[in-house]
Image (cartoon, rainbow, N blue to C red):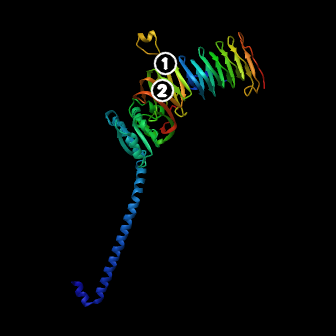
Amino acid sequence: MKTTISSAKNPNVSVRTARRVAQSAARIVSARNEIASIRELVRTARPHLAEVANARNNAYLYLYDSFVRESPHKDVMRIVEKRFVDFGLSGKVIRITPFTNCRSLIEDELRYGVKTVVVVGNNETVAKVMSRAADLDVVFGLIAVGKKDNELAESLGIPLNEEACNTLAARKIELVDYGVINNQRFFLTSIHIQNARLRITCDNTFVVKADKENVELAVSNLLPSSVQGMTKGFLHPQDGKLEVIIRPQVSGVLSGLFNRRAYSKPSVFPFRRLLVSAARPFVMTADGRETQESSVEITVAPKKLKMIVGKERRF
Amino acid sequence: MPNMDKMGGDDVETIVGPSVRVEGDFVSQGNIVIEGQVSGSIKTEKNLRVEQGAKIAANVTADSALIAGEVKGNIKAMNTLELTPSARVDGDVEVKTLIIAAGAALNGRCIMGGDAGLNGAKTRVKSGSYEDNNLISKES
């Protein structure tokens, strides 16, 4: 109304106003265009931004065994997690259960930029993860929690509990061998077969036969053999071979009297491929996990596993 | 001569125990200690030690060998072959240096030359029952 009155009095006023309105409209249009172009930029850059963010934040994936959250280890884990932050080793934490498919889990995380998988637990946890995922192209680390069942950490020179964070931060990577069972699953430490009548073929070139019926067989890689008297030496996880230790059982009067198994002196053979078969199924323990087998092919994947190790490692 | 006594612990790569038999071509890049039975062939780039009571029916190739058991087959040692008093070898031997202790039995030809003997071959027989019928010692 006011404008009408003023324009009626002064025609120049209406022209100026019209100009201003036109200029404002033009500004609004250009601003809208700018907003649209910015939106387009954000839309195209978003996946790349996510990648960068993932690479920065999720370079580490921590696989926690369920026991590490329980009472005796709570305090240790609190310190460990604080050190992860202090050392800039933060990453995604996943708690694994006996039903977790570690392979598919790690494969999924590799897509989001995970470079290092840290197993937080003990020997059993490592076996659980490695039995399916040892062949994945990723660096593996270990935080050994507790004092029991951590011989593997000792072998790799990784201190127990919170001290392991220093080794993880130092990030000394060694390539080590791992074993492959029937081209299906993997083992890091050892295999043990107790008292079975076995047929053993090494590298397709020679057959090992025992005079006695039953033999104890152990294959060692990252841990010394459980065979008595063979706990020292024979730990060569970087030589591209595994060692099989065969100990025939001796039947004697004393062993019968005291209900103790007696064995003759063990034999040791390095190999790249070992075939073990028997007429009857036998129990095989690989990395602490028992299975029933009748024929097993054990091969070596030489220096294929990237492992973070400490200075005090045994190889 | 490499010290065979030091072939223990971490130095030993392969051990054939006393109640074990190995059949086939036995090839190794490391030291071998045999206390059981082997038939076929044995080849190693390092040292071989055949303990007393061990029985070998195979041709043997090694850098150096110390024999205290029985060997039926030819032995080729790039450096030293030592036969202890309990050793019995039925086969030809080709070595650079041969040491035979009293009581050892060697039934076969002995060639000391080739690549191994270029720098001067030598044979040392300690004493006692030396059964070699056709010992040939030559420098080439």
Q: Is A200 on the left-hand or right-hand side of B120?
A: left
Res B132 quadrant in image: top right
Instruction: Residue lying at the far left in this picture: please name it.
Output: A1
The 10 Å Cα crowd at callout 2, few under 14, some 14 to 19, many 20 or more, is: some
Q: Is B1 on the left-hand or right-hand side of A156?
A: right
Q: Is A205 on the left-hand or right-hand side of B1?
A: left
Q: Label 1 lies in what chain?
A: A
Task: State whether residue A19 appears in this view.
Answer: yes
Q: Amino acid at mark 1?
A: Pro
Quick one: A39 or A141, which is closer to the camera? A39
Quick one: A59 or A267, which is closer to the camera? A267
Q: Which one is earlier in the sequence, the residue at label 1 or at label 2?
A: 1
Tell me if residue B41 comes above or below residue A38 in the rendering: above
Q: Label 2 lies in what chain?
A: A
Percent x, y for residue B120? 77, 24
Residue with the mark numbered 2: A276
Q: Amino acid at mark 2?
A: Val
Residue with the mark numbered 1: A248
